[in-house]
Amino acid sequence: MDIAFARLALPPRGALIFPLAEGAGLPPLALRADRATGGQLKRAIAAARFKGRKGQSVSVLAPAGLRASRVLLVGLGKAAEIDSLAVENAGGEAIAPLLASGEREAAVAAEPVKGAKLGPAEIAALFAFGARLRSYRFAKYRTKEEEEKKPTLARLVAMAADPAAARRAFAPLAAVAEGVFETRNLVSEPPNVLYPASFAAEARRLSRLGVRVEVLDRRRIERLGMGALLGVAQGSAREPRVVVMRWRGAGAGRGARPVAFIGKGVTFDTGGISIKPSAGMEDMKWDMGGAGVVTGLMKALAGRRARVDAVGVIGLVENMPSGTAQRPSDIVRTMSGQTVEVLNTDAEGRLLLADVLYYARTRFKPRFMVDLATLTGAIVVALGAEHAGLFSNDDRLVERLIAAGKATGELLWRMPLAEAYDKMLESDAADMKNIGGRDAGPITAAQFLQRFVDKTPWAHLDIAGVTWAKKDKPTVPKGATAFGVRLLDRLVAEHYEGKG
Ligand code: BES
Ligand code: MN
Ligand code: ZN
């Protein structure tokens, strides 16, 4: 679906959308539309008890006296409370029923809202952003589809008094949407198509945007001494990769310290020799979600020319059982020199992250590191799909992350770290073991990671519950969510741009 911008007018065809604040009257163009229909819109508003609340909508088909094929009224909530998320969500909810409705075009009228913090150009841009995010579909493997289910909507025209201003406001959002789509595509690909080498090849394509991409192959990884990552990879016929993506947008000197994002990229997690039950194992195709988010985030930052120096480092492996697979009780040596007794080969994410976190920290000396990983089933038990688990050694980073989460609707909930949990990782045979027992699973996993981050400000997002959605949300169709891209883009935009 394309997005275009135009002046406010009653359109000659297609769906016409009016976003309306709660309790406010109809703005001028909506009033004109109502008069042209002989009062049909006001009657529909009364009949549906439409108040303009968030999530409310009314649709009027074949309105008399207008050339539009339907009029859609969508609620934004109370004027004083309208924020970017409210407008994005309204855009997503408005567009969803139109996508495969037979409509080819829709136009949204962004008129000034009295008492709102956002102006009409911003509203037009944010509404279009939400609509675009919701329009995502992963359909490349479908060769037949019923006519009625095929998308028909080709264009959304965002109308505002100053269309040039709306277009300017939309430009960075379009780049973020591209990043989100990159992540959703990666996460949706099946594991026979997306494996470490093919993932790395896709990441390489970011170089077109000015991202410097390095792909480390098995020999390089061996020379670096990433024994924990290699141990996970050794059961698979697919060789591992580590990909380093660098965006230098701050214009600062060579010595400037970047921000760093690290992702777990297990392109399929069978569990290895500690094999998972077959029911539901297909979900483990999205065990590369963290790496997918880091890749999409780098695309978003580069796409909008963010004034920041950022590095993304992802560890890509496939966790398979085979004659060459690692065994429970194997002891591996991490790049940091610390040794790990592998008691469960299904606790593989922390193993590769140990090496990738250590590598990112010692090579780049970043201002902070945020890692994302579909790390534990237990975080899904604790938080469901409503929050990702947040673990951190830095209160300021936590505060900023939680705020960015609220602003983008990608919510985080802080979980504890403490010495007593760390003790649960003590091993009889090596420096640590890779599982802490049944209790406090997500926490002992995070404690394990913390042993490789030293004093660097660091946050770990356990995204196992939020990476794949079982139902639609306003701006996220069910399936791959790309949870984390908007959140971290926002974190960077709010705190780390233009300040060296
Ligand atoms: N990739 C899984 C975690 C996961 C589970 C992600 C469900 C998404 C949905 C991870 O590698 C794993 O297997 N974790 C184990 C850890 C355990 C062996 C300590 C788990 O959660 O059971
Ligand atoms: Mn696992
Ligand atoms: Zn896993």
Image (cartoon, rainbow, N blue to C red):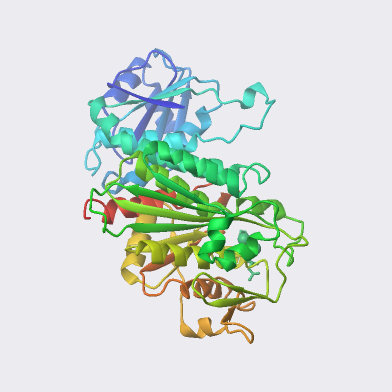
In depth, the one of 463 and 307 nearer the eye is 307
Quadrant into which the C terminus falls: bottom left
Q: Residue drawn 56% across and 59% down?
A: 464
In depth, the one of 220 and 161 nearer the eye is 220
On the rendered structure, is 39 left or right of 194?
A: left
On the rendered structure, is 16 left or right of 372?
A: left
On the rendered structure, is 37 left or right of 426?
A: left
The quarter of the picture where residue 193 lies is: top right
On the rendered structure, is 169 left or right of 4?
A: left
Q: Residue drawn 60% across and 25% down?
A: 150
> Can residue 359 be seen from the camera position used here?
yes
Residue 391 is situated, as x and y percent measured from the top left of the image, at 45, 69
Residue 29 is situated, as x and y percent measured from the top left of the image, at 29, 23
Ligand 3 appears in which quadrant? bottom right
How many numbered tags mark residues here? 0
Residue 315 is situated, as x and y percent measured from the top left of the image, at 53, 57
> Can residue 50 be seen from the camera position used here?
no
In depth, the one of 142 and 166 nearer the eye is 142
